[in-house]
Image (tube, rainbow, N blue to C red):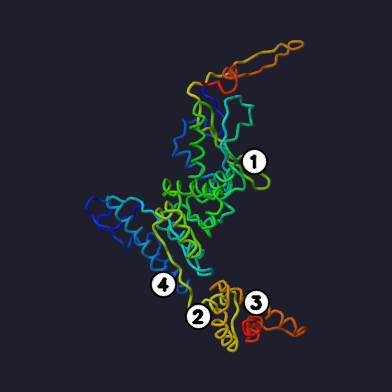
Amino acid sequence: MSTAAPGGAGEQGGSVDLRALLADSQVVEVLEELDRELIGLKPVKARVREIAALLLIERARKQIGLAAGSPSLHMSFTGNPGTGKTTVALRMAQILHRLGYVRKGHLVAVTRDDLVGQYIGHTAPKTKEVLKKAMGGVLFIDEAYYLFRPENERDYGQEAIEILLQVMENQRDDLVVILAGYADRMQTFFRSNPGLSSRIAHHLDFPDYSAVELEQIALAMLQQMQYRLSPAGLAALHEYIPLRMAQPHFANARSMRNALDRARLRQANRLFALQGMQLSREELMTIEGEDLRASRVFS
Amino acid sequence: MRITQGTFSFLPDLSDAEIRAQIDYALAQGWAISVEYTDDPHPRNYYWEMWGNPMFDLKDAAGAMQEVLACRKAHSAIYVRVNALDSTRGFETTRLSFIVNRPKHEPGFSLTRQEGEGRNVRYTIGSYATAAPEGRRYD
């Protein structure tokens, strides 16, 4: 694995070519992809960079023969719905894989249902099975606070938490656990499970997107789906976003995706109504203002 | 007499690192790993006791290795093997099976000749170990 870097890497008291190490890990590409494809999320990106730097330096230290204990990388992602927690978790798995921290780099996303059993003796095997699947990669527990139900003292969630804790402590080399959920409920969850909280080194908070960022996100999504907006459509989107943000149950990027899906539906309906006409590529691709303006937020 | 069943059985016993490498290979082929144990070494004893369920959808050997070690700890005096099941249509069978633990002393097999009609002889083999009841064969 060690690269033949100039400057005597790998020897006692030698030096390490960081650039060679960086090129070798290909982590720069993932970081750039993260920057390019994910809009906003400044603090999160900064933290991901820090973690990548830490791992890279650990690797350099190891090459040169300095003490390098593998750092604890369990994380918690808190933020409102649709702020990109799952997406970043996927990227995190890739980054950790490229830096050699996890062996396989896959992401296993689970919720309470996958970990907690329905009767006595059901939880432990279920949790262990999930953990085994996640080994060599990242275990992503969405809405982790559902694991703990204080109102029911015989709830099996506690058992799952205990098994999880044990693995998080003893098998750091085998998997990284990411707990995700809404900020306020995660706070309560950690307060009632101090053991869990103290084993998580990195708390990443995902901020809400601004209207400008949401517009960029919507446009990026359209591009990915091979659609585009007409000038009237763009103006409609511009008006739509602040209105939608003020609505209850606003879920950031997820709301944008849903809005676009509904606009596609209306576009399809509009084109369908023109029965018998030849449709050009342009028409099939374009979402008009009226497709967006039919939304209930305008009424 | 050292029994030779499954893959690698003519080689010296595999080390943990080697077992792990084999499991990693099996997982890379998309096979599911299971761990089984028995104290009856008869070659026609196909169905060993299962140590938990077969493990599907694993990506890394760590999880399976954990079960191998746990089974070996619980049944250190008897036979333990690792199976890799290929569920692709057309195979749907074990593709790889190797012993990862065996008793310190393997007493071997007896050969019984049964005289039949005419000058027919039927042969039967039986392990000396199975003379004792199950669970006390390799104490």
Task: State which tag comes first along the sequence, 4 or 3.
Answer: 4
Give the residue number, with chain letter if any, for mark 3: A262
Disc 1, SS = strand
Foreground pick, A52 / A212: A212
Q: Name the front one of labels 3 and 2.
A: 2
Q: Name the front one of labels 2 and 4.
A: 2
Q: Which mark is residue B93?
A: 1
The answer to whether residue A92 is left or right of residue A109 is left
Say which residue appears at 74% left-offset and 12% top-offset.
B116
The answer to whether residue A299 is left or right of residue A191 is right
Mark 1 belongs to which amino acid?
Thr
Disc 3, SS = helix
Using the rendered image, report if marks 2 and 4 lie on a common chain.
yes
Say which residue appears at 46% left-offset and 34% top-offset.
B14
Determine the residue located farthest toward the left in the rendered image: A13
Disc 2, SS = helix
Using the rendered image, report if marks 1 and 4 lie on a common chain.
no
* Chain assignment, label 1: B
Above or below: residue A233 compared with residue A156: below
Give the residue number, with chain letter if any, for mark 4: A42
Task: State which tag comes first along the sequence, 3 or 2.
Answer: 2
Mark 2 belongs to which amino acid?
Ala
Give the residue number, with chain letter if any, for mark 2: A211
Q: Are marks 2 and 4 in contact (CB under 8 Å)?
A: no
Q: How much space separates mark 3 and mark 2, taking CA atoms?
A: 19 Å
Mark 4 belongs to which amino acid?
Lys
Q: How much space separates mark 1 and mark 4, taking CA atoms?
A: 51 Å
The answer to whether residue B21 is left or right of residue A61 is right
Q: Which mark is residue A151?
A: none
